[in-house]
Image (spheres, coloured by chain):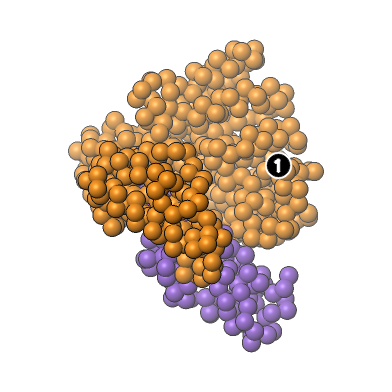
Chain colours: A purple, B orange
Amino acid sequence: MAKMKLFELAIARSGDKGDGSNVGIRANTPQIYDFLVKELTAERVKDHFSRICLGDVERYEIPNLQSLNFILHDSLGGGGTETLKTDAQGKVHGLGLLHMEMDVPSHLTDPARK
Amino acid sequence: MSDKKVRIANGQGFWGDSLLGPLRLVEEGPLDYLTFDYLAEITMSIMQKQKSRNPDAGYATDFVGMLERILPTCKKKGIKVIANAGGVNPRGCLEAIREVVEKLDINIKVGIVEGDDILDQLPEMMKAGETFKNLDNGESVETVLDTVSSANVYIGAKPIADALDEGADVVVTGRATDPSVVIGALIHEFGWSMDDYDKLAAGTVMGHIMECGTQATGGNYARWREVEDWVHIGYPVAEASADGSFVITKHENTGGLVDIETVTSQLLYEMGDPQRYLGPDCIADFTSIQLEQDGRNRVRVSNVKGSEPTDTYKVSMSYHNGYKILSSLVVPGPDAVEKAQLIADTIFGRAELLDVKIPEENRFVEFFGNNVCYEGILPPPEQPGEILLRIGAKGTDKKALDTFGREIVPMLLAGPPGLTGFAGGRPRATEIIGYWPALISKHLVQTRVTVESL
């Protein structure tokens, strides 16, 4: 096991959806995708964004794209046109997720360093 | 026939995108169609207001200026243009294009698509049983009906294809969905039927990949160091085949990056349920998409599956939802955060002396520089050298908010030392335009296509 940030395992993109945001994350390899399906649960993401996301977190699996999609409800301080926050559209939420640190099995870490 | 390739590009990710996109796309490589996406939810409301002051206004004026620059090249190379630039007045846009065409002394056919603007029909539609319940929270539209300032249906690709079938060189729509401007061209070129849902879904995926312009070609990409030559970043170009498969690429000798990661990043953008990407013409299943690298800066997209659409269209309404005011001050260290908090409390306190009491839940205070975009994820820096204090409020009383706003800049003379960077002077309250998503039965919506030779 090694402690790693998701930055080393995946890429991500985020944007607004009503008064929430979506964060899509793509694993660097199929093996890392399987690991994320198991470990990167909606609960874990909700906990990571607990100060930003005030609603529920939903998760969708997209195996063909080696990707997971998270919907972060009530995460913009009001809708995109109403909020006064700097990150009014949740553009930073993708990078925010990549800051998460995980315990990664060592057999995954070599191919992860693309 | 089966080898036929159609090249479609998107030169505009949003209203405000770089002028360089369309200019370079038509000049720097082969192209059959150039599409533009101008409309965000809030745009329709602004356009409706412009139209209420001037019946000839209410469309994307930038588009007409851009046409003047690119039409000679488009005419020479046979590039057709499709844009949802009509806003709430496609006919007004047509008249503006007429002037441009006369000035350039060329002959083209321009098609417009109308029928998405249902603002005037809302009362009768509600009498006929439409509820327009808010899709996000289920609320009844009655609560905001008096303040609705725009109402537009997200229409599909068929009327665009019809305009092209009638020979249009330029097609201007109102609130067509972003992918529809792409799908319309595909239906026209390949003669796809409106119940061939796999093909329509493939067009939807193509439109989704390209609708944010350079976000598919290296922009906003997590591994930004891999992206080459940002100055000359290429815009997305799709090479479409009749079977629904296509290649996403960009013109030769442009910057940026097209690989499976950049294309996937854009597929994930604004995604909801990946198996049910709802459009007016089909439901696309993003879990069916196959991507493969097809040479440098080329990604092949295939195997897209789709199914029958719902019997409703999405409607986007905007309404008046109070006012907001926001300003900022630069607070230098030492003790920047402590000072910023004192300043914020003082401004709200002084507003109270002027009989403006902003309730706690309507106050907004942000210490930018203190990792606010990573709140709860990264700890604030120990002692930030400087902080941008962003302070504001929301409310229903515009005058009260303006009174509060007057008390922000005076802190330069009546606060802790070194305050600076008061951007823009005294702030003013602006209207909050609320967004109301709803559904409408398809049979109530009648689109109309008009093609004119100019």
Is residue A28 shown above or below B140? below
Is residue B43 shown above or below B310? above
In depth, the one of B3 and B265 nearer the eye is: B265
Locate the C terminus of chain B by quadrant: top right
The type of residue carrying mark 1 is: Lys
Quadrant assignment, res B28? top right
Looking at the picture, how far across and down is residue B318, in whole percent?
34, 41
Looking at the picture, how far across and down is residue B431, in whole percent?
34, 39
Q: Which residue is mark 1?
A: B5
Chain for numbered disc 1 = B
Residue at position x 46%, y 58% from top? Answer: B367
Residue at position x 54%, y 51% from top? Answer: B201
In depth, the one of B222 and B396 nearer the eye is: B396
In depth, the one of B223 and B75 nearer the eye is: B223
Looking at the picture, how far across and down is residue B426, in whole percent?
41, 38
Q: Most extreme residue toward the bottom, as rendered? A: A1
Residue at position x 66%, y 45% from top? Answer: B236
